Image (tube, rainbow, N blue to C red):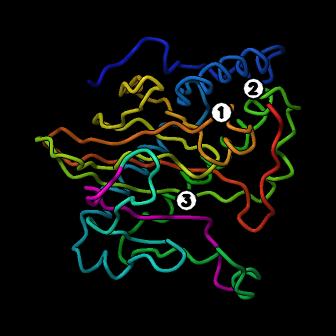
Amino acid sequence: MNQTVEGRIPVLDVGPMLEGVPGAMDALAASIARSCRDTGFLVLANHGVPQALADGCFEAAARFFALPEEEKLALKVGMLNLGFLPTGAQVIRTSTVNHNTKPNLNESFYISRDYAADDPDIVAGKPFIGLNRWPPGLPGFREATMAYYTAMQALAQRMLPAFAVALGLAPDYFAEDFTDPSCTLRLIRYQPQPEAEDNRFGFAPHIDTNFITFLAQSALPGLEVRTREGTWLRPPAIPGTFVVNTAEMLGRYSNDRFAPTPHRVVNASNQMRYAIPSSSARATTRSSPRCRAA
C-alpha cells in the first residue's frame, strides 16, 4: 500500500544554513541525521537553485525524447555510460532489494562533466572520463542541461558539511575526497503504466550507488520509498523543492549508520513522466572511501 506518512520524509529549510546563520548548520544536521537513520530521504526547501534552471532542464528533456528514435539511437551509450539508453535496455539484475526480471519502462539520457576534446584528461585517456554525446540540431539543449548540472553540482558541494556534521564529524571532513567530484545528470522519460503488472516498474526497486542524489519535483508522481517496516511511501510533492536520498557511498563512509534506502518508480498515470535526477559522488579515480566507526 502506498501512502505518505507525516514526518517520515521531512521537508527541511536549508536557507539559513546556506546563508551562514549561526546555529543553523547544527540544527539542520540534527534533522538530516534523524531522517538518514530512518528513511534515508528528505526534501530540501529554500535551496537557492532558481526554478527556471529546473524548468529549462525538464523542457530540454522533453524536446530530446521527442526526437525520432533513430536520432536518439545514434547517441546510444557506450563503455562510459554517456548518452542515450533506450526503453527496454535496462534490467536491474544487481538489485539486492528485489529480484528484478523485467526491463525498466523508461528511456534515459546521461550527462556528465562537459570536457573539451583537447582536455588533458581526455587526451590522456584517463579512466572513467569521456565526452558527452550532444544531439545535433537541438538548439539550447546543451546550454540548458549544463546550466542545471552546474547548479546541482554546486548545491551538492554546499550540502557536504551538513552531512558531515550529521555524522558527528568536522564540517570539512568530506572536502578532500570531493575536490574533483564525479557528478551525473540523468534525463528520464517514464512510459505510462496505468495498469499494474507483476514485477514491472518504471524503475525497479534498487538503492543508489553514489553519495547523494537530488531529484527536482516532477509534474507527475511516481517515486516511492520503502521504509524499514516494508511500507512504500511517496515523498511530499512540493513544487520548487528537491527530494534528496542517501546512497551506498555515504553508507560506506558512515559504516551504514546512513544506509541507503530502497526506492522505485511507478508511473500509474496515462501520461509520459519526466525526471531529472542528479547524483554526486567522490572522484572515481581515488582510493576507497574512508570509514568512520559508528
Q: Identify which residue, 35 or 18, lies in the foreground.
A: 35
Mark 2, mark 3: which one is toward the viewer? 2
Binning the other alpha carbons within 10 Å of mark 3 as few (below 14), some (14 to 19) or many (20 upward) gives: some
Residue at (65% x, 23% y) in the render: 32
Residue at (26% x, 65% y) in the render: 87
Q: Magenta stretch containing residue 194, yes or no?
A: no
Q: Amino acid at mark 2?
A: Ala
Q: Amino acid at mark 3?
A: Met
Magenta stretch, residue numbers: 99-118
Q: Position of residue 44 (x, y in %)?
A: 56, 27
Where residue 155 sits, quadrant-wise, is top right
Q: Earlier in the sequence, mark 2 or mark 3?
A: 3
Q: Identify which residue, 45 or 5, lies in the foreground.
A: 5
Binning the other alpha carbons within 10 Å of mark 2 as few (below 14), some (14 to 19) or many (20 upward) gives: many
Q: Magenta stretch containing residue 112, yes or no?
A: yes
Residue at (59% x, 22% y) in the render: 35
Residue where numbered disc 3 is placed? 146
Q: Which mark is residue 166?
A: 2
Instruction: Look at the picture and state if 110 lies above or below 257.
Output: below
Q: Amino acid at mark 1?
A: Phe
Q: Position of residue 96 (x, y in %)?
A: 47, 49
Cα distance in 3D space between marks 1 and 2: 10 Å
Q: Position of residue 83 (x, y in %)?
A: 44, 72
Residue at (74% x, 37% y) in the render: 254
- Quarter of the image containing the N terminus? top left
Mark 3, mark 1: which one is toward the viewer? 1
Residue where numbered disc 1 is placed? 258
